[in-house]
Image: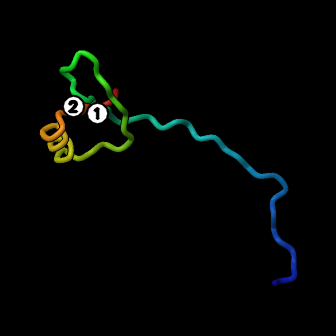
Amino acid sequence: MTNGTHNIPDEPVYTSQPPLMPVGYWILYADAPYRTSFGVYHKPSWLQRWFTTKLLGWTWRDAG
């Protein structure tokens, strides 16, 4: 145990961050009558996009 004072701020400082904007969207089964899509915040590489399209049938669409 130590004796002494601790440097504790009087009031905590809170800051708000703006929401992240997605860089693109995965569209699940784009040819289906009802589409499901979700945004992602880091663009996958071309190889990841290619394999996801070939294996799962999902389509990548850039935001913007």
Q: How is the protein colored in the picture?
A: rainbow
Query: What percent of the width, then of the height, locates residue 17?
Result: 58, 41
Amino acid type at circle 1 is Trp
**Residue receiving disc 2:** 59
In the rendered structure, which amino acid carries the disc numbered 2? Answer: Thr
Where is residue 32, by image quadrant? top left
Q: Is residue 13 above or below residue 31?
A: below
Q: Which residue lies furthest to the right in this view?
A: 4
Which residue is painted at 56% across and 37% down in the image?
Answer: 18
Residue 63 is labelled as none
Q: Residue at x 20, y 46 (%)?
A: 48
Of marks 1 and 2, which one's residue comes earlier in the chain? 1
Q: Where is residue 28 in the image (x, y as percent from the top left)?
A: 25, 29
Classify mark 1: helix, strand or loop.
strand
Position of 20 relative to 13 (above/below): above
**Whole-percent x, y for residue 50 in the image:** 15, 41
- What's the residue at 36%, 32% (across, down)? 38
Image quarter for residue 9? Answer: bottom right
Q: In which quarter of the image is the N terminus?
A: bottom right
Q: Quadrant of residue 46?
A: top left
| Above or below for 22 versus 64 | below
Residue designated by label 1: 26
Q: Give the quarter of the figure containing the C terminus.
A: top left
> Seen in the image, is 25 located left or right of residue 1?
left
- Most extreme residue toward the left is 54
Decide: few, some or many residues near mark 2? Use Cα within 10 Å; few <14, some 14-19, many ≥20: some
For mark 2, give the secondary structure.
Answer: strand
Q: Nearer the viewer, residue 22 or 32?
A: 32
Residue 25 rendering spot, x and y as whole percentages: 31, 32
User: Foreground residue, 40 or 31?
Assistant: 31
Crowdedness near tag 1: few (<14), some (14–19) or many (≥20) residues, C-alpha within 10 Å: some
Q: Do the residues labelled 1 and 2 touch (CB within 8 Å)?
A: yes
